[in-house]
Amino acid sequence: MEISKKLITSVIFLGLTFSFTQCSSAKGMKRESQKNFSYDEAEDYAPSVAAAPKAAPSGEISQNTTKPLKRMMVYSVNVNLQSKEIEAKVTEVIKLAESFGGYALQYSSNGSVNLKIPAEKLKQFLFTLRNQSQNYSEEVSAQDVTEDYTDTEIRMENALKMRIRLLEILKTAKTLEETLKVEAELNKVSESIERFEGRLKYLSSAIQLSSVHVQVRQKWEPVVQKEYKPGPLGYPFYYLYIGLGKVKDGVLWLFVQEIPKEKTEIPD
């Protein structure tokens, strides 16, 4: 009976420790920075690696030297452009995305296109699209998910270790009560592992494939009025038309004349 109490106490202690660890690590899930700018500015904001640690004095080897941390960035781009033919431009944009290894998630006849572009080819894709478009503008949003990804990995490792420990405890369970308590904790840990796996897959996909939304709008062009000149056989009719206009003005002058109106002065 004493052993049973110790086992149940151990399970409860592990469960509380696991919950406390997950809650303290969960704060990192919300620490994500986001900023809007052009793509060139985004590259300056998100360097490929973090700043290297300070060098140790000459003749000494630093014991706390760590590897440079690679930044994990998620890019989202909004593009606006104009074209004479909207549907033809939408087809052109989709084909351009496919040529860079991307694909279309959604598109419509009103000119809206949602794309996924490999992150390493995003800059080249935007550069090509800019050169092939008129009245082009873009807005890039960069989100740093390095801390979120790292925290999730740590929580995943802790959950895996906890599951191994609980499986070991389950083998020593003697009563049905002990078995049920350990299995309940195992179910909680297994659910946490599944959530962490899903989160890591989502972040990996978002990092590798950037989201690009393209909006194609109708290009407005002013209507140019064309001047018509009569051909060789049209000149007689042209002058006849002008002459009839003059005759009409003369007839009107004979029968109708403008009578000047008296001006009404405002009294002082």
Image (cartoon, rainbow, N blue to C red):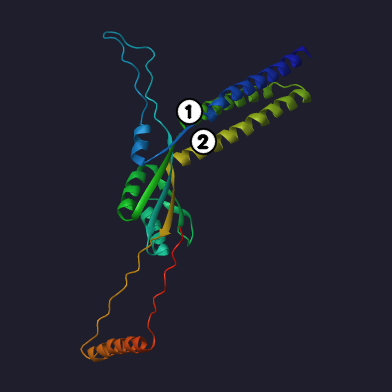
Is label 2 in a helix, a strand or a loop? Answer: helix
2 vs 1, front mark: 1
Relative placement, left or right, of 78 versus 236 is right
Q: Residue at x 56, y 25 (%)?
A: 27
Name above or below for residue 118 compared with residue 219: above
Question: Who's the residue at 75% across and 27% down the image?
Answer: 180
Q: Which mark is residue 147?
A: 1
Badge 1 amino acid: Glu
Q: Residue at x 38, y 54 (%)?
A: 81
Sequence-earlier tag: 2 or 1: 1
Q: Quadrant of residue 251?
A: bottom left
Say whether residue 70 is left or right of residue 24.
left
Q: Is residue 116 visible?
A: yes
Q: In which quadrant is the N terminus drawn? A: top right
Q: Residue 190: percent from the left, percent from the top?
A: 63, 32
Q: Nearer the viewer, residue 104 or 130?
A: 130
Picture quarter containing residue 249? Answer: bottom left
Q: Real-space Cα distance between discs 2 and 1? A: 12 Å
Q: Is 219 drawn above or below residue 203 in the view shown?
A: below
Name the residue that disc number 2 marks: 200
